[in-house]
Image (cartoon, rainbow, N blue to C red):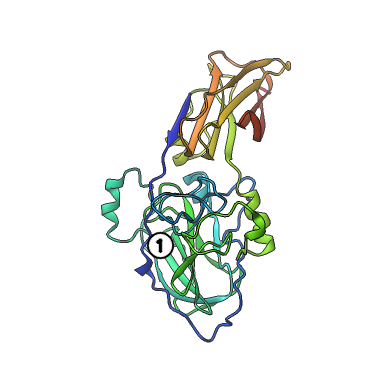
Amino acid sequence: MRTRVAIIGIGLLPALLGFLSSGSLAAEPLQLAVPLDCDPERECLVQQYVDMAPGPDAVDPFCGSATYDDHKGTDIRVPSLREMEQGVPVVAMARGRVLRLRDGERDRLIRALEERADLNGKECGNGLVVDHGGEWTAQYCHLKNGSISVKPGQMVETGDPLGLVGSSGFAQFPHLHVTVSHSDTVIDPATGREMGSGCVANASEFRPLWSVEARKWLHKARRMIMDVGLAGGIVDHDQLVQKGAPSELKITNAAIVGWGWFANLRVGDQVRVRITEPDGGTLIDTTGEPLARNQASYSQFAGRRRPPHPGAYSVQIEILRDGAVVETRAKQVMVGK
C-alpha cells in the first residue's frame, strides 16, 4: 500500500522582519555554514529549495522538482514532531547582527489551506533576520516556540545558537526555512543565482554561497529515504509525521510489515520492499507501480499476515528510477531474542 501527501505552498511574509543593512559589517562575498546542528544522513534532510522558474511553474536549482511555485527559501526538515521535541539546534550561518525577531507562536502542523487564515500574516511563525553586511540578510523561520536565544541588536558568529527547529507558522512538517537575500532580492544559496533566473543542470555554472563544508553536508542531506523499518501492522503516513517511526516488529505481532518513508520522489519512480526472514529466505519482494506524479512526501509498505519467528529479520527499501536503483537503505530487527 502507498500513501501520498502534497505539500502546500508556504508564502512567507518578507515584511515580517524587514531586510535592513549595517555598514559596520564587512561587505565581503557571503560564505554560509549549515544552519542546523544535526546528522544529514539520519536526522535531517533537504525537503525544498528556492523556486528558480521564471514564471508560474516551479523548478528547483538543479532542474528537479524539489520546490513549489514562488518558494523563496531552503527547507531543511527533521522527519517528525518526535525528533523536533528532542531539540535540534538552529545556528547562525555567518557572522552578523540580529535585526528583528518574533517568538511566542505555537507549534502545530497545518493540514489544510483553510487553517492559514488563522495565522494572521504570521506564516513565518517564530523567526528572525540576521544582517550580514554588504546588503546581505538571512531570514530564519518556523523555530520552536520559546526557543529563540538571541535579542535584536546582538552580534552572532558563525555557528552560534539561535534557537531550535520547530513547526510554528505555516508549517506542514517540522523544519527550518532560510531565505538569503541581497539588496532585497532573493538569492538561491545553492547556485548563487537570483530566484526565478532558471535552473542550472551543469555544476560548473554554480557560484554557491554555501561553504565547502556546508556543500558536503547538503549533498548528504539531499537523500530521498527518510526512514525504513519493520512493524507489526499497517503504517499510517500521518502518524509518521506526528509520532515518527512505529514500534518495531515484535514476536507477539500478527503480521510482518516492511515500510519506507520518502521525500521528493519523481513521477515514474518505483519503490521496492524486500523482507528477509531469519533463515535467509525471502518473505516479501515487491515493487510498487510507477508514481503518477511527483511526491514531496510519500510512504509505502508491504507485508504478510503471519506472526514472526524468533530471529533477525531485515528489510531493504530501494528507489528505482528508469529501472535503476538510485537510493537504498536497509534495517535489521531482532525478534524474540
Give the quarter of the figure containing the C terminus.
top right
- Farthest-out residue, right: 280
- Farthest-out residue, top: 306
Q: Position of residue 294 (x, y in %)?
A: 48, 38
For the residue marked with disc 1, what is the amino acid?
Answer: Asn
Q: Is residue 103 above or below residue 48?
A: below
Viewer-closest of 212 and 208? 208
Asked if residue 6 can be seen in this view, the reply is yes
Q: Position of residue 16 (x, y in %)?
A: 36, 68
Asked if residue 236 can be seen in this view, the reply is no
Residue drawn 59% across and 38% down? 225
Residue drawn 60% across and 61% down? 34
Q: Which residue is mark 1?
A: 126
Check disc 1: other Cα within 10 Å, few if <14, some if 14-19, many if 20+. Answer: many
Q: Is residue 287 above or below residue 185?
A: above
Q: How many marks?
A: 1
Q: Is residue 70 left or right of residue 35?
A: left
In the figure, residue 101 lies in which quadrant?
A: bottom left
Q: Position of residue 282 (x, y in %)?
A: 67, 16
Viewer-closest of 298 and 255? 298
Q: Secondary structure at mark 1?
A: strand
In the figure, residue 273 lies in which quadrant?
A: top right
